[in-house]
Each structure stands twice: as C-alpha cells, then as structure tokens.
Image: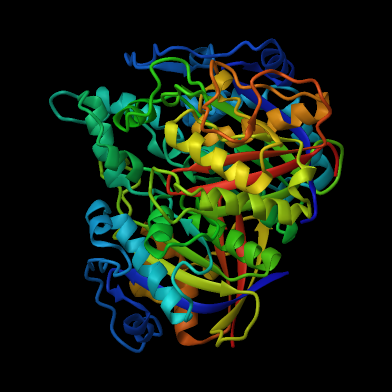
Amino acid sequence: MMQAFIRGVSVCGPGLDGWAASRAILAGNQPYVPRPIQPPVPSILAANERRRTGAAVRLALSVAQQASEMADIAPGGIASLFATSNGDGAVVHAILQTLASDEPVSPTQFHNSVHNAASGYWSIATGSRQPTSCLSGGDASGAAALLKAVAAVEVEQVPVLLCVYDVPVPELLAPRRSTMGSFGAGLVLAAGAEHGALARLRVTYQPGPAPPDQEVPRGAAWRELAAGNPAARLLRLLESLAMGIYDDFALSLLDGHAQVTLDPC
Amino acid sequence: MRPLVLTATTVISAIGRGAAQTLAALRDRRGGLAPCDFQGIATGFIGRVPDVEDHALPPELARFDCRNNRLADLALHTDGFDAAVAAARERLGASRIAVVLGSSTSGILSTEEAYRARDPLTGAMPAGFDYEHTHEMFSLAHFLRSMLGLRGPAMTISTACASSAQAFIDARHLIEAGICDAAIVGGADSLCGMTLRGFASLELISPVPCAPCDAARAGISIGEAAGFALLERDGDGVALVGCGASSDGYHMSAPHPEAAGAVAAMRTALESARLSPADIDYVNLHGTGTRANDAMEDRAILAVFGANTACSSTKGWTGHMLGASGIVEAVISGLCLRYGFMPGGLNVAVLDPAFGANVLLHNADVPVRRAMSNAFGFGGTNCSLVFAAEA
C-alpha cells in the first residue's frame, strides 16, 4: 500500500484563514464562523505579477506558500501538483464574453486562462525548475490529486507539494456548478517521517462507492461547504489532522473511491 | 525507470485517421494545413479533422457531446484501440485501468456557441447547455472512462501544450505505485475560438502554413487531434523508457531564453532511461514555428545533444495540436522506431542559419533505435519522453 508523510499543511476557506487559526476550529475547540475570506496576496509574487493574477491563482499560491513554510521547505524547492475542478472561471467567462462580442482577446487573459495558471505563476514566483503538473477530477479533484501526489512521492521518493483549490464559477458559465465559496488546501508530502511529520497517509484506490460515513466530515458546521466545493472535500482529512486522531476515510471518485488511512505521528 | 509498453495506440489529426494514414502522409510529405475556415475566423492556417461535425456519440452518452469528445470518440474507434482496451479490461479488471488524459481547452467550443446563442432579452443560456459534461476539464477523462467501461481512477491533466505528454508521466506514477496495472493515456484538443483568437492576440498565428525552424518562420498553425495509448507494464509495442519534466520559472507564455527548463527536462529523461545523448537517434521537437520556441529549442538540443543528433518538428504537417501534441508526436515517434524512418521538417524553405542543431529537412529511411519527443507549454512547463522500439 502506498504511503506518504504529511510535513506541512495549509487551509484557506470561509472562516478558515490559515492552518494556525483554523486548527482549533477544525478540532471542534473553537466556534466556526463561516465568513468569506479574502485570500491573502501571496508575498512571493512580484508586484507586476500580482496585478495580473486573479482570485484563483492568489488562493492557490497562498496555500502553496503556507504549506511550504510550515514544512520548512523553500517555496518552489520541490515538485508540485495543482488540482482544481474549474480553474479560473472568471477569466474563462471574460474571454467567452469577448469572443461572443467579437472583441479582441486580451493576451494576458488568454495566458491566464490555462488550467495550469497557478502552477505556472508558482514556478515563476519561486524561480522553480521543479516538475509540476495540474489536473482536474471534477468533483473528485481532491481524490484524484491525493492518489497522484502520494503515488509520485512513493515512486520518485521525493517530497511533493499538493495544492487543491476551487473558486466559484460565474453562474452563467456553470449554472449547475455554483461552487460554494473559495477553498484551498495545501499539503507537503514526503517519503519519510523525518523533519517532523504530522501524520502518515496510506492510500488505495477501491472500486465501488465510498461509505458515506467515511466521506462526510465529522463537523456538521462545514458539511455543506465540503459538499459544495470540490476542494473542500479534503475537510475530512484536515479535521482529522487538526484533531490529531487516527482516521480511516474515503474520497469519492466517480463510481470508485480513494480509501485513506491517516495515522498521526 | 522501469520501461512501460504502449500495447495499443491510436491517433487522428489533420493528416489522417490511424497509424497507416499518418505514416503515409509523413512519407509522402502531404501536410494537413489549409486556410482557416473555422467559426468565421480567417486568420492563418489550421489543421482541421474532416467530418467531426457529423460524428455522433452513442445515445447513452449524448450528454458528453461536444467537438472535443467527438474527436476523442473517433480516435477511440480507430486502429482497434477500443477492442484492445476491452481485452485489457477482461485480462486486468475494469478497476485496474486508470484514465489519465490531457487537454488544454476541453469542450470549450460548446460554451462559446452557447454564449453566442444566449437569449437576447434575458441573457439566459440555451436550453440543454451542459458545462459539466462538455467544457469542464474533467469531461474528457470522464467520457473516455464511460465509453470504455472502465472503473479505475480518472483525471484530466491540463498543463497547456504539454498536457498529453505530462499524462504519460502522471500515469506512470499511478502504475508504478500499484494504484493500477494499466492506464489509458493521451488526450484531445479541438479547434475553438479561444485558442484561434487567443494565439492571434499574442501575434503568434502564422499567415502561411507554419514552418518550424525556417529562417522566415512566423508563428503557429493551430491543429486539432486526439490520440491514446494503452500503457502497461508488459506486452508488445513501443516502450516508454524515459521521461522528464521541469518548469522554466520564467514567464507564462514566453520560453526561457537560455532554454534552462527544456534542457533540464531532456537531461532528466535521459537519466531516467539510463541513456547517454548518443543513444538517441531522433528527437521529435516541440517545434511550434514561433520565433522564440524554435530558437530556444535549438539551443536546448545543442546543449544536450550537440550538433549531430537528428531532429525535426512534424507540426508543419499537423499544425500545433496544443494539448494533444504530446500524444500525436509520441505515436509519430513510435512510427519512426517501427518503420525506420525520420521525417524532415515540412514547409521549410531555408533552415534558420542561426540554428546549430541537426534539423532534418528531408525524410530519411534509417533505423531508429530510440526517439525523444518534446512538449512544452504555457506556464513554462516542459516534458520530454524517450521511446524505444522495445523495452
């Protein structure tokens, strides 16, 4: 069974502003107040790049930077995997409106429209030469990303930064995809437990539906968020990590699921 | 790395449907580019696949209907690929085969058409518009998994023009880690206003058929294509023996001027294959036809291989198939290995005199033991794959 150790974690979502501030909330020791948060502008981005990036990229870079810092890894110093169901819907919507009105497309918007925009800006901001990939698994983006990231750690025996994020898609573009809030989570995964690992993850892929009690977060307060934003499906993992408890949980992936065991170190 | 075998492949592009037509077009030096006649856009040339408009998906999967998935479905029903996957499904089990496919724009054309067809009074989108199953990035992998009756993990890899090359690397991790025993890799990208007009805004569309490595090259011609490979640990077929990926860390849409990322990807691929540069007989270049890409790649080839290793771009035939380039050029590399053949760049009148690499201008019938294929994308992401005639 493949495994990886969590060396760093970050979260940014409604009422969850960074891991330090969110840990007690996710552990159930502090009340959850789901007010929308403004993703912090990532300090690693140069001023001219900050102006060019939208909410999705800023969210992704913030959680990527915070998870790296917690793991005491130089930002961009390790391989990365970004996962988002929708990418930057606002940019795509703006270009679609431009196309429909036969106006010229903005070059900056065009290169920002790629699904891997966050991964590109991350490597630019950090000057990284490391491998990076970007995937979508629809609602199961978190499950697909966890399988892929842990597999990369296992096979390459190198640490991997995983960044899972989704921001709302404009209503017109995706009326049945009105992603709730903005949510991002980052994990630094490593092959060994040295350097202060928080927990060990063991992951398998299983055919058949995820047992519902193993997928839904324990905290009733953020179940709606977990159901409404693909990235927020990782809340079950995050709350178990915050509580420091052993957990055997599942993440749906179409008609199968990722089965995950989390063991605190 | 432990080699993986491409036990079945399929391809469809502007130069043909299937390996035989693709090989014949390359050998006969028949390109697939024609003046752009797509969606009222008349800038430059395109590599259009005929009759995509007339192809229908099976009724039970009609919700996935869009140009990109039609193109994917055409590829699926070519060269016996669907039958090969069905046999693998029987042998390995449906849940042991992953679907890892690359695309840069998925089925966005459907959304472009829907935005144009909005109700003029209410602004409402047309009835039946289904973002999730057409335009959403996951649509392609979800569609293929449904078509093939597979039950393994599925994901769409979207790293711009490196997407379907990156899919090989990501699928390899899943197979090597034991998450699955085989994977459908490759991908699809189809013509749309987004890329035709987006690249025009960057002034990267060539007014004449693209001529990679030509002294007077003036940009890309956009093509569409789909292709897949069944990647397994064992079996008969061309083998993936090395792969490397890197980032430029430089610019979203311009390549690194010193080619640092491309060099790193190629060197990593050679190291993972435990090969030296001299072991590579042919490099299928990313070779888009832009001033910057081709100059950068020439520099990278010189740094890694020196001035002798034969290389060429086949985008003069197909156009730049964006996220589908990686799989199409992997299949072309496989044809070079299998038939002992190297294509010389098409549409090239005069090789850029500043170039130092051994860019082929004429087809050559010579044995090819190992071939490298490059794919680079926006965001500064680079992939190099090494293929061998056998594992």
Rendered location of residue A169, percent (x, y): 30, 47
Could you tell me which residue is drawn at 81 percent across and 40 percent down?
B90
Judge by depth and name the residue closer to the eye, B164 or A143: B164
The colour scheme used to paint the residues is rainbow
Q: Is residue B262 above or below residue A196?
A: above
Q: Quadrant of residue B199?
A: top left
Rendered location of residue B52, percent (x, y): 52, 16
Horizontal arrangement in the rendering, residue A147 relative to residue B230 (left or right)? left
Horizontal arrangement in the rendering, residue A163 relative to residue B112 (left or right)? right
Horizontal arrangement in the rendering, residue B160 relative to residue A175 (left or right)? right
Q: Is residue B329 above or below residue B249?
A: above
Q: Is residue B142 above or below residue B351?
A: below
User: From this viewpoint, is residue A261 visible?
Assistant: yes
Q: Residue furthest front?
A: B353
Quadrant occupied by the N terminus of chain B: bottom right
Judge by depth and name the residue closer to the eye, A164 or B15: B15
Could you tell me which residue is drawn at 84 percent across and 43 percent down?
B91
User: From this viewpoint, is residue B127 visible?
Assistant: no
Rendered location of residue A97, percent (x, y): 23, 32
Judge by depth and name the residue closer to the eye, B22 or B122: B22
Rendered location of residue A172, percent (x, y): 25, 38
Horizontal arrangement in the rendering, residue A192 relative to residue A109 (left or right)? right
Could you tell me which residue is drawn at 27 percent across and 74 percent down?
A15
Q: Residue furthest left?
A: B121
